[in-house]
């Protein structure tokens, strides 16, 4: 979050409503409740679920953004195509924060990026450093019961089914429960 240098005047787009996009949506709605935040994800069920919980602070987009109207874009889709959407959507001199890991997909720099003069930062929240601790504290201090509908906890015994259905799941985050029983 610190890398993004969010300002109250920012028009914000989050690409992706999975685990990272959901966490970004929650954090931004808590820290900047008056900001205009729009979210796009091709999984309509996941997007609808997120929007139903955060209806006061986010607006879901039914189509990928095509106009350069956002001063700050968080690319959390996990898809190389998401980076293309981010570049198309960011305003001149805007900011793109990429938290996706493209895992073998051929992400490229679109040619329209150069004239925009935007800044692009690649971020990753892993480990036990201070950003991770701050994220945990933020979640713990703001969590409400209705946020539970954004996650699902599944048994390790059905992990193959979970991964098969991951792209169509309505949940922003799937947690696999490992127990010794």
Image: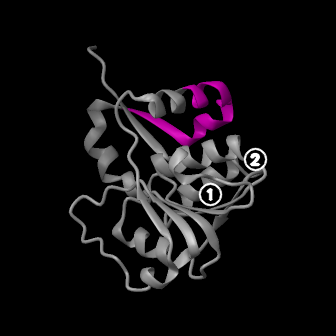
Q: Position of residue 13 (x, y in %)?
A: 60, 63
Residue position for label 2: 33
Between the residue at mark 1 and the residue at mark 2, the CA separation in whole angstroms equals 19 Å
What's the colour scheme? one colour
Q: Is residue 146 magenta?
A: yes
Task: Write the residue at 57% across / 73% down.
Answer: 93
Which residue is label 1 attached to? 48
Above or below, 138 against 69 in this view is above
**Front-most of residues 90 and 177:** 90
Q: Secondary structure at mark 2?
A: loop
Q: Quadrant of residue 139?
A: top right
Residue closer to the observer: 40 or 163: 40
Mark identifier at residue 89: none
Label 2 Cα crowd, 10 Å radius (few <14 / some 14-19 / many 20+)? some
Q: Is residue 35 above or below residue 153?
A: below
Q: Nearer the viewer, mark 1 or mark 2?
A: 2
Residue visible at 38% across and 72% down in the picture: 81
> Is residue 142 toward the left or the right of residue 78 in the image?
right
Q: In the displayed structure, would residue 137 be above or below residue 81?
A: above
Instruction: Out of 164 and 13, give the one closest to the viewer.
Output: 13
Please provide percent x and percent y for residue 127: 34, 31
Left or right of residue 73, residue 7 in this image: right
Residue 79 visible (yes or no): yes
User: Which range is magenta?
Assistant: 137-154
């Amino acid at each position: 979050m610190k890398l993004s240098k969010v300002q109250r005047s920012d028009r914000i787009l989050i690409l992706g409503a999975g685990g990272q996009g959901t966490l970004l949506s929650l954090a931004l709605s808590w820290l900047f409740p008056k900001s205009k935040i729009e979210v796009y994800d091709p999984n309509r069920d996941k997007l609808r679920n997120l929007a139903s919980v955060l209806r006061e602070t986010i607006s879901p987009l039914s189509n990928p953004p095509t106009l350069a109207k956002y001063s700050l874009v968080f690319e959390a889709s996990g898809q190389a195509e998401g980076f293309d959407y981010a570049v198309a959507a960011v305003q001149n001199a805007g900011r793109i924060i990429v938290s996706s890991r493209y895992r073998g997909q051929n992400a490229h720099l679109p040619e329209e990026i150069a004239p925009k003069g935007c800044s692009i930062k690649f971020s990753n929240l892993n480990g036990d450093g201070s950003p991770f601790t701050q994220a945990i504290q933020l979640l713990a201090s703001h969590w409400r019961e209705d946020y539970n509908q954004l996650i699902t906890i599944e048994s390790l015994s059905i992990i193959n089914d979970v991964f098969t259905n991951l792209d169509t799941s309505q949940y922003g985050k799937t947690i696999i429960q490992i127990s010794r029983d």
